[in-house]
Image: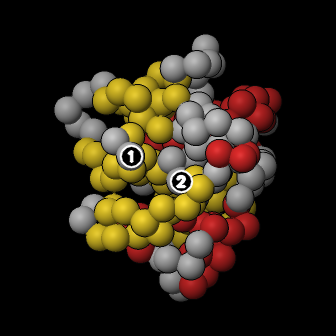
Amino acid sequence: MKIGVLALQGAFLEHRKMLKKLGIDSFEIRQNRDILCDFDGLILPGGESSVMGKLLNELGLMQILKQKIADGMPVFGTCAGMILLAKEIDNDRARHLALMDIQVKRNAYGRQLGSFDAKEKFADKMVDMRFIRAPYVSKILSNEVEILSVVDEKIVAVRQKNMLATAFHPELLDDLQIHRYFVKMLK
């Protein structure tokens, strides 16, 4: 099993460390040639969604990755990755991969000073969560979307078929449960 981690900007190294702890092989996707090899899943890390979206287009990665995900490749988006996957963004006209039937609100918890940690259920298991300038799901656009976690009455984790998205950063904590959940999606 091999997972590609988008490495244009953001917390990609932290995701690779989590995968290594689980014994999963990973590699960085930085340019078009990086996605020519065979791989089984994709992680879209936290960071700045507008920068990542711009670079995905400029580097010719957007349509290729969009097709792989549309064809069923499992993908896990955290924070900015959730925004990249969303079909609609409340406070932004930009659309990126636009494959997941969710509407999100960018920077929903405010600036960096609004960052916080929480412990809440994710798919019926308690997990640690770190929110940094995080979005949340403001609207579910189809019944194919499963809500996996809610914090303070806001939807912060969802799954739709082969797509998993969290508003928080599990890669910044020691809890491996969410990465383990994603790896199970690949099997």
> Which quarter of the figure has residue 106?
top right
Residue extending farthest to the left is 143
Give the number of the disc on residue 168.
2
Q: Amino acid at mark 2?
A: Phe
Confirm whether residue 33 shows in the render. Answer: no
User: How busy is the neighbourhood of tag 2: few (under 14 within 10 Å), some, or many (20 plus)?
Assistant: many
Kindly identify the residue that appears in the image at 52 percent across and 29 percent down.
Answer: 105
Residue 47 image position (x, y, % from top left): 71, 47
Q: If you read the primary sequence from the N terminus, does the residue marked by circle 2 or circle 1 appear first? A: 1
Residue 13 image position (x, y, % from top left): 73, 67
Looking at the rendered structure, the secondary structure element under dot 2 is: loop
Kindly identify the residue that appears in the image at 34 percent across and 70 percent down.
Answer: 126
Determine whether, in the image, residue 15 is placed left or right of residue 23.
right
Q: According to the image, label 1 marks what residue? A: 152
Which residue occupies the foreground of this view, 81 or 79? Answer: 79
Kindly identify the residue that appears in the image at 50 percent across and 77 percent down.
Answer: 175
Q: Nearer the viewer, mark 2 or mark 1?
A: 1
Q: Amino acid at mark 1?
A: Asp
Kindly identify the residue that appears in the image at 31 percent across and 25 percent down.
Answer: 141
